[in-house]
Amino acid sequence: MPVKDFDVVLVDDHVLLRNGLAKLVDSFGGYRVLFEADNGKDFTEKIGLHAMPDIVLLDINMPEMDGYETALWLRKNFPLVKILALSMYDNENAIIRMFKAGAKGYILKDCEPSELRAALDGIMHKGFYYSELVTGRLIHTINKMDDDQPGGGLTQLSEREIEFLKLACSELTYKEIAEKMFLSPRTIDGYRDALFEKLNVKTRVGLVMYAIKNGIFSL
Amino acid sequence: MPVKDFDVVLVDDHVLLRNGLAKLVDSFGGYRVLFEADNGKDFTEKIGLHAMPDIVLLDINMPEMDGYETALWLRKNFPLVKILALSMYDNENAIIRMFKAGAKGYILKDCEPSELRAALDGIMHKGFYYSELVTGRLIHTINKMDDDQPGGGLTQLSEREIEFLKLACSELTYKEIAEKMFLSPRTIDGYRDALFEKLNVKTRVGLVMYAIKNGIFSL
DNA sequence: CCCGTTTCAGGTGAAAACACCTGATTCGGC
DNA sequence: GCCGAATCAGGTGTTTTCACCTGAAACGGG
């Protein structure tokens, strides 16, 4: 009698990638794609309709509900489901955020299929998968922590700051952003300076880059 | 006797997507993946080693040699090979550039597999595939052409401008960019203003967004 | 109750970015 | 030789961005 396959769910807004991924996962042997979802929101609506998956392959940058939110939701509602984060970028903050949100592994979209397989195997059999990439980034972050602030590795942004960050990714001046947020230009000044400090950047372009890399702003 | 399958080549730097895509294309029936390449450069090196493909699925944003360059190279060296452009963004300029470079179709990475299939079929049987998306964008561009400049739809950037654009996607000041490019700050001023005009933006953030959307700068 | 945190908002000055102008080279094509 | 296009570079002035202050109001928890 064959051993039961592990049930995998794919959550990614890129349908083509997702479909291909499905075929890849199915071809591995030992894994079976239970269902797919377009984004976090879609996923939360579908998970109740199926058997409980063993593992979720979760994209980070998605519209509607991103990977970070989805991971938090999953940990709260289905803590037994394991999360493998899938990202375009090897961004330190993204890695830390996803692991803090309960991910068991983090792989890049341009990794080899063999690494995907290794990640799935690692998570199902050992409970986690830490690639060299992840380890390397984490060590780098640890090293930075001395310089920056002893507080902690992860930068936590408030709702208001994220709102501002999104607007900063436009051709609006800070004055115009202030109007849109019903705030004084001085307050915006404050948000900007606070973010410069938190995100370790010095210019508005730096803010934009951070927002894009972390999926706060989607082009 | 079965009809011979069409030979497809995949060019994309995201290995996972590419592998999935390969399985998807193979599963369609009537198509067979001949080989895959990591980027344009890799592709130009591999194409001589195989039979001539019928169609190339070509990603636009790639390191080393992007889809645009690759399309031009292909038209020059293997004009019979048909190109289906594959992109993350439904960017007007990107669409126009790729079609000008000889692409027969343009689809998004988050389209349905059925659209990929339709695009492959369209290109192989009719010689082209114009999705609603493409048609819509092109009409939009036509409409814009009156307002902007009667010259033409596509913005052509010089080497120097592209170099500047890349550096603008950083926290360097224009003065520092000038130093890096061995130019006077005034000259940089000129490049900036010229690009504001050409790209129809008003601020440096606008430049950054353009550069990212068009793959001139890869995060 | 006080304390820390978050949110808000003001002032000042310096640096950078933006707008609009000018003209000198170089280079290839007609 | 002349012309247009591309490249380079200077001047002047305004607006925006950035740096570094300050403090008030609101709120939840020890």
Image (cartoon, coloured by chain):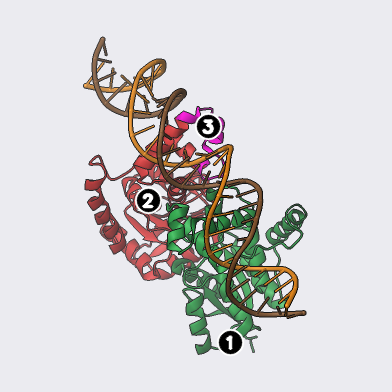
Chain colours: A red, B green, C brown, D orange
- Quadrant for the C terminus of chain B, please: bottom left
Question: Residue B50 location, x and y as percent?
Answer: 52, 88
Q: Residue at x 69, y 61 (%)?
A: B134
C-alpha gap between disc 1 and disc 2? 42 Å
Using the image, name the chain to which the residue with label 1 belongs: B
Q: Earlier in the sequence, mark 3 or mark 2?
A: 2
- Quadrant for the N terminus of chain B, please: bottom right
The stretch of residues the image draws in magenta is A167-186
Front of the two marks 3 and 2: 3
Question: Callout 2 environment at 10 Å: few (<14), some (14 to 19), or many (20+)?
Answer: many
Q: Residue at x 46, y 49 (%)?
A: A205
Choose top left, top right, bottom left or bottom right for residue A84: bottom left
Q: Is disc 1 in contact with disc 2, using a CB cutoff of under 8 Å?
A: no
Q: Residue at x 49, y 59 (%)?
A: B184
- Classify mark 1: helix, strand or loop: loop
The answer to whether residue B143 of the structure is visible from this angle is: yes
**Which of C8/A132 is in front?**
C8
